[in-house]
Image (spheres, rainbow, N blue to C red):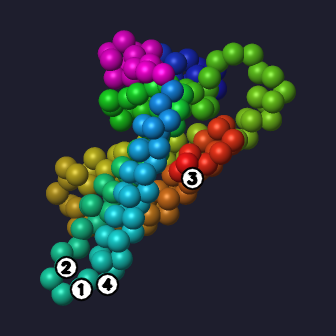
Amino acid sequence: MVRHVRNVKYDVEEKIKDGRLKQTGIDHALAHGHFLKAYHDLEVMENLDRLNSERPKGWVPCPDWVVVSAYYGMYHAALAMLALKGWKSDDHDATIAMLKYIYVYQEGKLTLADVQKLEKAKTLLDEINKLAKAKVMRKDASYGVDFLEIDVRDILRDARPFVERMRLLLKEELGYDLLSR
């Protein structure tokens, strides 16, 4: 795990140097906007999936756009998380790396409270890894030619819970629900 922490830290440092991650100060309005966009993307995902299943007359199935919408819902939730930690990302890989670094591998001495958060960190790492997997699926869906053969079950299962998990984490950190204000 120590080696992985170093790799994540190095990756984040490189992305900061490259300008793909910028420290901007905490931005509640930006985080709020990203969460609104995340939920919009999830609605698009669910509507497209329903239409793909029902196949009304004239409907052209688009599983690739189900994947794209699901991924961007997850991605906007991740950007919201970074905005509330004072970071802005212009790169998908940088977003994932910084999310891992901030919420799972942040360096420093472990307090008792930190130790109690280890299980929570493991859960968050699992969620972030789902985002990374969704990124690969989104790339394949956007640029691949076998787009009608895409299996959307995993991303449909993972997208909304990912966004909800990020929202819950922020609610715990802020003491209120960002979207209720």
Q: Is residue 30 above or below residue 168?
A: above
Q: Name the residue under label 2.
A: 59
Disc 1 secondary structure class: loop
* Residue 19 inside the magenta-drawn segment: yes
**In the image, is 19 to the left or to the right of 3?**
left
For the residues labelled 1 and 4, say whether their Cβ atoms are less than 8 Å apart: yes
Residue 51 x/y as whole percent:
30, 77
Determine which of the numbered discs, if any, sits on residue 41 in the image: none
Q: Earlier in the sequence, mark 3 or mark 2?
A: 2
For the residues labelled 3 and 2, say whether their Cβ atoms are less than 8 Å apart: no
Q: In the image shown, does 26 or 142 lie closer to the viewer?
A: 26
**The residue under label 4 is which amino acid type?**
Glu
Mark 2 neighbour class, 10 Å CA radius: few under 14, some 14 to 19, many 20 or more:
few
For the residues labelled 2 and 1, say whether their Cβ atoms are less than 8 Å apart: yes
Comparing labels 3 and 2, the label whose residue is closer to the camera: 3
C-alpha gap between disc 2 and disc 4:
9 Å
Residue 94 x/y as whole percent:
40, 28
C-alpha gap between disc 3 and disc 2:
36 Å
- The residue positioned 19% from the left and 49% from the top of the image is 143
Q: Mark 4 points at which residue?
A: 54
Comparing labels 4 and 3, the label whose residue is closer to the camera: 3
What residue range appears in magenta? 11-25
Q: Name the residue under label 3.
A: 180
Mark 1 neighbour class, 10 Å CA radius: few under 14, some 14 to 19, many 20 or more:
few
Name the quadrant containing residue 6.
top right
Q: Mark 1 points at which residue?
A: 56
